[in-house]
Image (tube, rainbow, N blue to C red):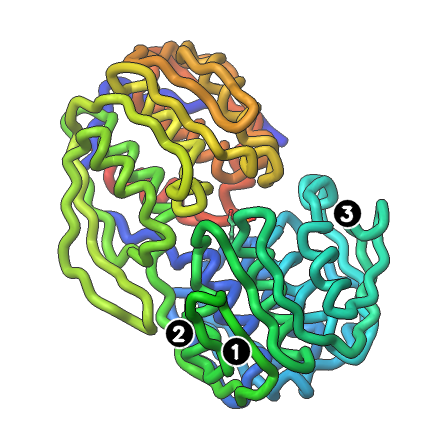
Amino acid sequence: MSHVQFECTSPRLEGEVIVPGDKSISHRSIIFGSISHGITKVTNFLDGEDCLRTIDAFREMGVQIEKEGNSVLVHGNGLEGLKKPAKTLDFGNSGTTTRLMLGLLSGLPFETTIFGDSSLTKRPMDRVTAPLREMGAVIEGEEGGKYLPITVHGSALKGITYRLPVKSAQVKSAILLAGLLADGETIVQEDTETRNHTEVMLQAFGADLKQNHEGITITNKGKLTACDVEVPGDISSAAFFLVAGAIVPGSTITLKNVGLNESRTGILDVLEQMGAAITISNERITGGEKIGDLTIKHTALKSTTIEGDVIPRLIDEIPILALLATQADGKTVIKDAEELKVKETDRIEAVCRNLQALGANITPTEDGMIIEGPTKLTGGSISSYMDHRIAMMGVISALISEGAVEMDEKDSINISYPTFFDNLEEILQ
Ligand code: S3P
């Protein structure tokens, strides 16, 4: 692991960025393509390490998947076409692969063992294994199935009604996937809406899924049929350039074809509240998902409070929003975001330590952080914590720091945004 240093004297950002495909939707395109009948053509697939783990998992289970750059052809033979993998499945850093696959594997007629890297091994899996066991899943793992490695002994499942105790789309999706294999109705209820890509895509593939006041109901009755997926640009990746455009003096950036699904656009609401100059154009729908172009210009910003129902709509954007808040006038409070502690790293700690090291006035709290701005960042030495979003926040912070920003590594960025540095170079004037 080699240290890297970023230094930019009076940069300005200008031009267009085509951000890569959405990570959540890319994972799901492979999962639903693999368990449906027929050939699913995926375009603008995210070629990031996490999504490649999902492809590897289904190839291990006998699904033919052809990939050329960002285009993928998935030859699905239905749920019954999946075979016992010949080896244990390595899910690397990918929480989404792990949690969604736990749901699916629970109802398949074979035994599978899964493991991951040191970060994934520390992340809680009981949020998924507990409801799956209620459905009849037979799961063994570290600390009673709380942590990887985990072995799933596929078994007969029955539908349950489950109210999500954590605001997590991964948990919701795991239960819905198990519901595809369960007897009777599976109903998931959530107090706060989390990202709904699983529901949108399951309906497009023909699942028997309905949504009403009772919750999201799924049965094993629908026949899943292949459906082409055009993956929208990832708003969670666009977020780094949205914030860069807002805080680097003289900048104007347009981000093309960004996914604008309402369950993901919390960052746009916050940018607006903070007075950012942002416009949306070319709005359209593709594959049931809204997309559009976002243009952002540098302008003075004011502080805000980020809390409550908006949190799941911007959970992955909080690290970069914290950097934004260091440049806003006044006190920004982020709360109700305790989920940050169980992401790829403890993101409350990672964000606060790094921004403090760069000269920001930021204080961690139990469920978020408090940032006083505006502060001129000085530069300094930080760590990526091997977390892609913390690493990208570090790089963007260098654009507004007086001195250099030194970071312990940058390769973790390949998890979700392999073309990050190319895109940055394209707009750096
Ligand atoms: C994801 C859901 C979110 C998010 C993650 C991707 C998904 O996690 O942080 O990056 O694709 O469902 P939680 O469900 O744990 O909140």
Mark 1, residue position: 33
Q: Is residue 276 left or right of residue 331?
A: left
| Residue 292, percent from left and from top | 22, 58
Discs 2, 3 touching: Cβ within 8 Å:
no
Mark 2 vs 3, N-terminal side: 3
Discs 3, 1 touching: Cβ within 8 Å:
no
221 in relation to 318, above or below:
below
Q: Quadrant of the C terminus?
A: top left
Mark 2, residue position: 229
Query: To which quarter of the image does residue 84 belong?
Result: bottom right
Discs 2, 1 touching: Cβ within 8 Å:
yes
Question: As shown in the figure, which amino acid type bears the numbered disc 2?
Answer: Val
| Residue 117, percent from left and from top | 71, 45
Give the Cα separation between the discs numbered 2 and 3.
Answer: 32 Å
Mark 3, residue position: 147
363 in relation to 292, above or below:
above
Asked whether the viewer can see residue 259, the reply is no
Mark 3 vs 1, N-terminal side: 1
| Residue 20, percent from left and from top | 37, 55
Say few, some or many: other residues with alpha carbon within 10 Å of mark 3 (under 14 / 14 to 19 / 20 or more).
some
